Image (cartoon, rainbow, N blue to C red):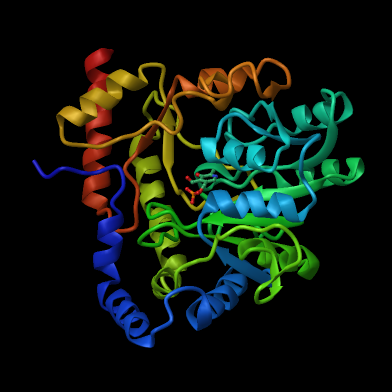
């Protein structure tokens, strides 16, 4: 029985091995190991991919989000509206600025921010200055950006997109990362565009916001050794930039392959009792994860594991119920959908190198499991 992992970043390295090895060799021989030409080329190429004017490459997605928020002036006393159904990194980044997160419920179909909750929370918020909204394009499905931008504009707050899981996802043909004022991406190895280490990027078409991020990235320098503002060290390594450049060439075809695998799951499981992903009419999903729902999620996960099939739960405990955050972050309303979805979701194997035969095997075992329990 050949195991089927839930994700496999090594397979992506093997798929593009010769280009990655050449890129690594080029950097090793260049003598420039941090920032430099490779990072500048990558910034240009990634901005073109997203369709934004500028990119600043940084050390991680969490840093990218924190610096994007700081560039918008977010800090102590400010409220930042986001969702509880996300990676805890979203919260960490908001809190690192000194701001207070206000957590909203999700739409149970797309698992992204519920826009009516946003509207109500901006009207009727806890004590503090509403300053920014952070929609998360979770699992590769875009949040409802036209509605979020319209509501946010009415209330004069910044929109900072968390695109960590959605490189290349679109709404009405326009990429995520170009809807809000500024956006953050992660290049954690399992992401649709993954480095072989940590990495992240901030993207925007507002040159002033990105100039601020560029200063924050390296000690607040505008000119070397002159700190204009207190900054950080969040530089991207040249090696990671070169690897990302090699992989960026394949991102569109990798995303197409993910979509093909998702269609196969959908065809095979359309009669099943589990709940399949639901895609908003104007959205292009990039299937960072293929997430199904069933009330017996843990039992199904164990059953698949018995047949060598990996699965995962993203995320089993919503942020407002995590020991570090419970009772400290604000929640708006009772987050009903967030809570029940967390108990039912299961991420099936999906990555560009996964074979159709493997998808068939996963689907067959899900069907068998359903037949056994009926
Ligand atoms: C939704 C979301 N936001 C932010 C991040 C943070 O990215 P990183 O792990 O690169 O810091 C991640 C990655 O795990 C994520 O999934």
Q: As rendered, which of 314 and 24 lies closer to the eye?
A: 24
Q: Where in the figure is residue 59, as x and y percent of width and height? A: 51, 59
Residue occupying image coordinates x 34% and y 52%: 351
Residue occupying image coordinates x 21% and y 50%: 357
**Position of 200 compared to 205: left or right?**
left
Residue occupying image coordinates x 23% and y 30%: 304
The N terminus, quarter of image: top left
Which quadrant would residue 216 be assigned to in this image?
A: bottom right
Which quadrant would residue 48 be assigned to in this image?
A: bottom right
Q: As rendered, which of 237 and 181 lies closer to the eye?
A: 237
Q: Where in the figure is residue 299, as x and y percent of width and height? A: 28, 18
- Is residue 171 something one can see in this rendering? no
Q: Looking at the image, is 162 positioned above or below residue 115?
A: below
Q: Residue furthest top?
A: 374
How many discs appear? 0
Q: As rendered, which of 77 and 83 lies closer to the eye?
A: 77
Q: As rendered, which of 114 and 123 lies closer to the eye?
A: 123
**Position of 209 compared to 89: left or right?**
right
Q: Looking at the image, is 83 positioned above or below residue 350?
A: above
Residue occupying image coordinates x 31% and y 55%: 9
């Amino acid at each position: 029985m050949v195991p089927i992992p839930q994700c496999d970043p090594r397979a992506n390295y093997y798929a593009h091995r010769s280009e990655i090895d050449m890129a690594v060799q080029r950097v090793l021989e260049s003598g420039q190991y941090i920032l430099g030409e490779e990072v500048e080329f990558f910034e240009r190429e990634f901005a073109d991919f997203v369709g934004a004017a500028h990119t600043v490459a940084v050390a991680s997605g969490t840093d990218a989000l924190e610096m994007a928020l700081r560039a918008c002036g977010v800090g102590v006393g400010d409220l930042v509206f986001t969702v509880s159904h996300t990676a805890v990194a979203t919260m960490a980044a908001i809190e690192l600025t000194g701001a207070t997160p206000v957590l909203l419920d999700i739409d149970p179909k797309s698992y992204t921010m519920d826009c009516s909750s946003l509207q109500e929370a901006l009207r009727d918020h806890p004590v503090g200055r509403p300053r920014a909204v952070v929609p998360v394009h979770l699992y590769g499905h875009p949040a409802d950006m036209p509605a979020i931008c319209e509501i946010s504009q009415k209330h004069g707050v910044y929109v900072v997109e968390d695109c960590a899981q959605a490189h290349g996802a679109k709404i009405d043909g326009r990429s995520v990362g170009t809807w809000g004022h500024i956006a953050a991406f992660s290049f954690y190895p399992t992401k649709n565009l993954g480095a072989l280490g940590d990495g992240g990027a901030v993207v925007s078409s507002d040159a002033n916001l990105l100039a601020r991020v560029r200063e924050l990235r390296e000690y607040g320098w505008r000119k070397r050794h002159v700190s204009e503002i207190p900054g950080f060290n969040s530089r991207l390594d040249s090696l990671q930039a070169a690897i990302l450049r090699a992989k960026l060439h394949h991102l569109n075809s990798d995303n197409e392959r993910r979509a093909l695998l998702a269609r196969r799951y959908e065809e095979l499981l359309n009669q099943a009792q589990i709940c399949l992903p639901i895609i908003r009419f104007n959205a292009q999903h990039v299937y960072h994860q293929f997430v199904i729902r069933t009330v017996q999620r843990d039992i199904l996960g164990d059953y698949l594991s018995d047949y060598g099939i990996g699965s995962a739960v993203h995320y089993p405990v919503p942020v407002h119920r995590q020991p570090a955050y419970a009772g400290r972050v604000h929640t708006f309303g009772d987050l009903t959908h967030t809570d029940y979805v967390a108990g039912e979701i299961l991420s099936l194997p999906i990555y560009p190198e996964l074979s159709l035969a493997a998808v068939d095997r996963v689907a067959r075992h899900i069907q068998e499991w359903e037949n056994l329990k009926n």
